[in-house]
């Protein structure tokens, strides 16, 4: 038995006061009698002198003493202290990076082995999200990127002295002094071939795999298949803006597909030759294009300009003064598939004249009468349109701004940087192979902590019952008199 306020027992001195008050001589009671003869029949209410020395211990006095003792005990705060097992403070770090995608069922089974009665804080890696208790393991979702569990383990070490790490490989992290790390590894052999490197430079795509495999490659939707190597170097046509490389599905799909897209960079445009309001309006409406004068443009548009050097990465010649064998009536025109003609409809090509281009060309854009080339890419960066049109012809059709948007995008090839999505680092593609289940006994026994049972309420209830009994005794005594 223990007491919160042992000094309250000084109140037991009130019992001595009760005893002294019990010695107080009661006032004599008057009786009116018709004759003094009856005096001798009246009981003597005055105690003899010797009774002052030894008070009579009546039931009322005993009850008063018990009530006082119960109230004093209640003020002292009685209770009982007993040692009981206390919750253990444990910090759990769960690796939710991409390599854990095929391992989450095993990870959830290991988390279920933890005792919910413990004081557990769960920290996700690499997001560093923090949760009190294990909660619902089914709600844990891995992300499709690699991550270092080190920051999450540092955070966990500041929370508890016992750490549990759940992942597919041993982390490159050492616990600080006084902190114990329990490794729970859910790795194991899995069939996986992934893309570990992908980038574009100097007009070429470089791909590297974790093992030799076939790759399905799409350049702006045009598919081709690469076979038989662990690394590939592929020429990328000018104007390509989206590259998608994918492998056959396996047990770890997060590294089976990579998409590279060119971020839109600004394209400076300069005009030469006679003015063309329609082309200028189409260029000004393009958010990527910026018209400059006497600068160093990436795109130069020459309309009916005389022959001469055109210093720019991309040059577009319209109604050229040279390089045309003859001018013809438009007749039936056909659009050849090319990034520059994407979205251009043949019925929109309302020309007054078209010219037969002289010399070899790299890619035909528009075929004129008899299949002759009237618009083409002569060589990379040089586009020729041997066409003449009125302001109410091709410029009034939807294909006109679409074509010039394609030209700006084509000119922007190499101006913007390539951005890869879905590419994991090589370490993430090498899945962990270690397995080490959680041993709950390794967490140790629960520490014993003193638990106090308070009896103050019981003492107050006892005092109340004794008071009720004392009231009943006094009431009955008063009625008897």
Image: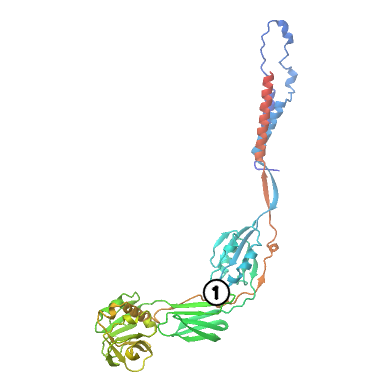
> Where residue 101 appears, x then y in whole percent?
58, 70
> Can you see residue 76?
no
Residue 438 sits above or below residue 193 on the image:
above
The residue located at (63%, 68%) in the rendering is 106
Residue 225 vs 158, above or below: the answer is below
Q: Where is residue 314 in the image (x, y as percent from the top left)?
A: 35, 85
Residue 81 screen position, x and y as percent: 69, 47
- Dot 1 lies on which element? helix
Left/right of residue 263 with respect to residue 170 in the rendered view: left
Q: Looking at the image, which is closer to me, 117 or 188?
A: 188
Residue closest to the eye, 20 or 144:
144
Residue corresponding to mark 1: 254
In the rendering, at what x and y percent does residue 248 appear? Answer: 56, 79
In the rendered view, does 160 fall on the left or right side of 323? right
Q: The C terminus appears in which quarter of the rendering?
A: top right
Q: Quadrant of residue 313?
A: bottom left
Q: Is residue 231 left or right of residue 175?
A: left
Asked which colour scheme the image uses, the reply is: rainbow
Q: Between 8 and 233, which is closer to the camera in this rendering?
A: 233
Q: Does 372 appear above or below 174? A: below
The number of callouts visible is 1
């Amino acid at each position: 038995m223990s007491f919160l306020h042992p000094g309250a027992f000084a109140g037991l001195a009130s019992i001595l006061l009760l005893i002294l008050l019990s010695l107080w001589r009661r006032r004599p009671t008057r009786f009116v009698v018709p004759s003094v003869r009856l005096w001798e029949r009246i009981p003597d209410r005055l105690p003899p002198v010797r009774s002052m020395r030894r008070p009579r211990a009546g039931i009322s006095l005993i009850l008063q003493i018990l009530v006082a003792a119960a109230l004093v005990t209640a003020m002292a705060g009685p209770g009982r202290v007993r040692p009981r097992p206390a919750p253990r403070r444990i910090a759990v770090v769960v690796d939710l990076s991409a390599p854990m995608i095929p391992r989450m069922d095993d990870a959830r089974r290991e988390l279920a082995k933890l005792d919910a009665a413990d004081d557990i804080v769960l920290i996700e890696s690499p997001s560093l999200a923090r949760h009190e208790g294990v909660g619902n393991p089914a709600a844990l979702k891995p992300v499709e990127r690699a991550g270092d569990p080190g920051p999450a383990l540092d955070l966990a070490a500041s929370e508890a002295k016992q750490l549990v790490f759940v992942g597919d490989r041993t982390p490159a992290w050492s616990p600080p002094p006084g902190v114990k790390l329990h490794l729970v590894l859910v790795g194991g052999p899995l069939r996986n071939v992934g893309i570990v490197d992908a980038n574009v430079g100097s007009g070429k795509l470089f791909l590297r795999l974790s093992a030799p495999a076939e790759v399905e490659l799409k350049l702006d939707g045009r598919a081709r298949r690469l076979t038989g190597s662990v690394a590939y170097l592929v020429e990328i046509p000018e104007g390509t803006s989206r590259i998608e490389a994918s492998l056959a599905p396996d047990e770890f799909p997060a590294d089976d597909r990579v998409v590279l897209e060119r971020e839109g960079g600004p394209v400076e445009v300069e005009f030469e030759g006679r003015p063309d309001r329609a082309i200028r309006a189409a260029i000004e409406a393009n958010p990527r294009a910026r018209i400059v004068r006497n600068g160093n443009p990436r795109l130069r548009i020459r309309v009916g300009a005389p022959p001469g050097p055109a210093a720019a990465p991309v040059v577009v010649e319209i109604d050229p003064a040279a390089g045309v064998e003859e001018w013809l009536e438009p007749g039936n025109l056909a659009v050849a598939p090319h990034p520059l003609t994407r979205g251009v409809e043949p019925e929109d090509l309302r020309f007054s004249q078209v010219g037969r281009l002289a010399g070899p060309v790299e890619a035909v854009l528009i075929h004129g009468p008899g299949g002759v080339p009237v618009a083409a890419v002569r060589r990379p960066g040089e586009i020729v349109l041997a066409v003449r049109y009125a302001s109410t012809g091709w410029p009034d059709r939807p294909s006109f701004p679409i074509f010039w948007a394609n030209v700006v995008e084509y000119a922007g090839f190499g101006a913007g940087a390539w951005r890869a999505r879905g590419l994991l680092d090589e370490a993430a593609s090498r899945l962990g192979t270690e397995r080490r289940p959680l041993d709950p006994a390794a967490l140790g026994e629960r520490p014993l902590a003193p638990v106090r049972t308070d009896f103050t309420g019981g003492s107050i209830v006892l005092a109340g019952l004794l008071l009720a009994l004392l009231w009943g005794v006094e009431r009955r005594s008063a009625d008897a008199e």
